[in-house]
Image (spheres, helix red, strand yellow):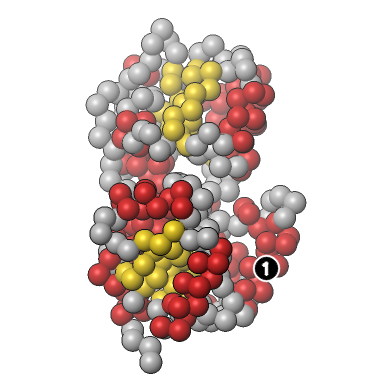
Amino acid sequence: MIVANFYNIKATNGLFFYGLDYLRDSCDLLRIILVRPELKRRVSEELPGVSIIECSVWRYLIEILRARLRGDLLYTPTSHPLPFISRQWIVLHDSYPFEVGSKAKLKRILLKWSLAMSRCRVAYINRSEAKPFVACLGVDARRMIFAPNRFPDASQRISHSTSQNGIVSVGLLGTDSAKKNYDRLFGAVRSASLSSRLVFRVYGHNSAYFREIQSTFPDIQIELVRSDEQSIDAFMNGVDIIVSASEQEGFGRPIASALLSGLPVELLDRPVFREFFNGGARFHPDINDLVQSLSRLNVNSMSNISFVAPADVVEGYELANAEIRRLGSIVVR
């Protein structure tokens, strides 16, 4: 059986939906999902009928111990391995938390130590950056597995232009941390004198990072679209183009949804984005070049994007799903 460990997920972000996608195909093997109290309702809505336990720290530790004694597979869709538990599957999405910030070095040491103290499986969601990072932590290749995101269904687009009075609506994705590079993006927009021609709609949560960005750039139209209150389909129908100034993403679920629905996407030229979105998105060497492309936008002449998910990524998702089911069905005595 499978015990899903969502305890380290604090919001309905990409990690949350990544984990749910894999669990949907293994509900018959799912014993319980461990969550923080604030996420119980959302998990219940996404996976009705599944047993969900909202955890304090002590309840979490007790349920982990019970899972270990039963021999359950502990499925953790985040990079939080627990030492001394070998029947465990953890996921490395990107190296950003372990390379940037005042606590990055400590986080990296703890991750490497925890991985060394267990024989858990380590999934990586991309081969261009996450896989080499896992390898540099000393994880044996036999413990590693490619487990990419499931490419989402295409958003149902109703309108192909939201432009009013020549103002173009630009969609931005995520509000979780400075890795989104909104300070550099909006600084370039300001320098290019584009503030009056663009409105930015940011899909995410009302985080401290978003509030800081909004207060730093009062001259730029920046609107929050709360992802807990509006579907991704509705958001895609409210923008003319999707833009990302991020340099360190593990995948980009909304980017995939936008491309599959035919919405234009502008990205920085980074290996992860090339791995998943080559042939669909337009790539730029730096943020200034990306912003210059926004200055040339003409929504009336925009054409739909034709894009299909890479076959090897689709196959990777299916193989990882099958491996989780195989491990979850093993009876340990």
Q: Residue 61: image x %, image y %?
A: 53, 70
Q: Image height check: is 172 above or below 327?
A: above
Q: Residue 31: image x %, image y %?
A: 33, 71
Q: Residue at x 71, y 50 (%)?
A: 101
Q: Residue at x 46, y 53 (%)?
A: 37
Q: Residue 284: image x %, image y %?
A: 54, 36
User: Is 79 on the left-hand or right-hand side of 333?
Assistant: right
Q: Residue furthest top?
A: 165
Q: Residue at x 36, y 57 (%)?
A: 20
Q: Image height check: is 42 above or below 121?
A: above
Q: Residue 84: image x %, image y %?
A: 57, 81
Q: How many marks?
A: 1
Q: Does the rendering let one see residue 235?
A: yes
Q: Does the rendering let one see residue 272?
A: no
Report crowding for label 1: few under 14, some 14 to 19, many 20 or more residues within 10 A (C-alpha): some
Quarter of the picture containing the N terminus is: bottom left
User: Is 286 on the left-hand or right-hand side of 49?
Assistant: right
Q: Residue furthest bottom?
A: 333
Q: Image height check: is 329 above or below 268?
A: below
- What residue sits right under mark 1 in the picture? 110
Residue 175 quadrant = top right
Look at label 1 and name its amino acid: Leu
User: Is 86 on the left-hand or right-hand side of 218?
Assistant: left
**Residue placed most toward the observer, 36 or 263:** 36
**Residue placed most toward the observer, 12 or 123:** 12
Q: Residue at x 45, y 78 (%)?
A: 66
Q: Secondary structure at mark 1?
A: helix
